[in-house]
Image (cartoon, helix red, strand yellow):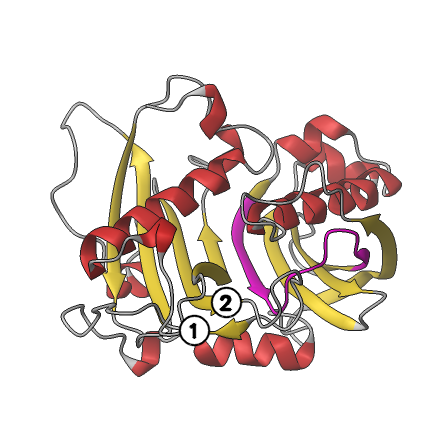
Amino acid sequence: MLTPSMCGHNCLFLAQIADWTWQTVSTTCGTAIYRETNDQGLPAYLSFYYLRTCGSASIQSRQLTFGDELDVVTTAFNFGTESMLTLHRITRLGDAGPSVEPVTLDEFHEHRRPNCLYVEALNRWVTRSRPTSNDALVRSSPSGIVTAHLPAVPDRYSPRGTYDRARRLGTFHNPEEAYETIVDDFTVDYTIDAARDLNGVGLVFFAAFAVIVDSALLKLWTRLGRDVTSFMTRIVRDQRICYTANAENDSRLRLTLCLWRRRNEPRDEVFNVLVHDIDRDCRVLVTTLWMQSPEESHRAS
């Protein structure tokens, strides 16, 4: 059952998904996940690297509210000892009770259920290369982690090619498809707020980045003449994020947004956001959102 700290038009539900992810890894891999160290005795953290969320008109993370009862089914996969792939199937709990059927990669990629929210997460174990810096995090497996017993990820379902391409091109979208460019270069600057954006170990929380992106997206949304209500009721069918770096506790970020619209269905839109650390001159993340805007918001723009 969702409590106020687990839902809302911000990072709270995403943070809850992170908790479910960590709990799954801890249960299936025999890790003390909140206190893990590598072979050198340095803290090792299960950081988000790639995240894909697929919803529908019937279930969106932003629609969930106090008291909603959910059925959450999670499967962990073997992606080596330095990374973890988990897949969540989330739906509203019905009269039939909890599901006993595991969620599979075949279901996610080929036979997605219409009333379910799916979240695919690739996490990497990292540690700091310098004790007081979030720069240059390095891969670092925790001592004793066991993954060989988990189901393997078939090559056809591996997200590696998808996020490698997005890192190279700066988008998960293929702009050569039947889309026209509406906005090519809208920028928003943001400075990391140490009082709000850091997690308990001093890293910028992965879900805080998602809020920073949404805040910039809202600025573009209103610049297009759309109202806040239509932003809150938009349908995000698919969102993919690749986190390529963390940020320092006072980093200045520049977010560059693009918007494409499908020519034969103008309510189908693709927003792309690149986040760049100005002082370190490095990319922090790339994210692409495939969404359906409300009809009235499209008329406004």
Res. 230 visible in picture: yes
Q: Return the residue at label 2.
A: 127
Q: Secondary structure at mark 1?
A: loop
User: For the point 31% across and 36% down, which residue is it?
Assistant: 91
Is residue 26 left or right of 200 when viewed as pictured? left
Q: Return the residue at label 1.
A: 140
**Which residue range is magenta in the image?**
236-256
Predominant secondary structure, magenta span: strand
User: Magenta span has 240?
Assistant: yes
User: Magenta span has 211?
Assistant: no
Percent x, y of residue 142: 34, 68
User: For the point 75% across and 29% down, which residue is it?
Assistant: 228
User: In the image as oriented, which residue stretches furthest toward the top?
Assistant: 67
Is residue 58 left or right of 269 when viewed as pictured? left
Q: Secondary structure at mark 2?
A: strand
Which amino acid, mark 1? Ser
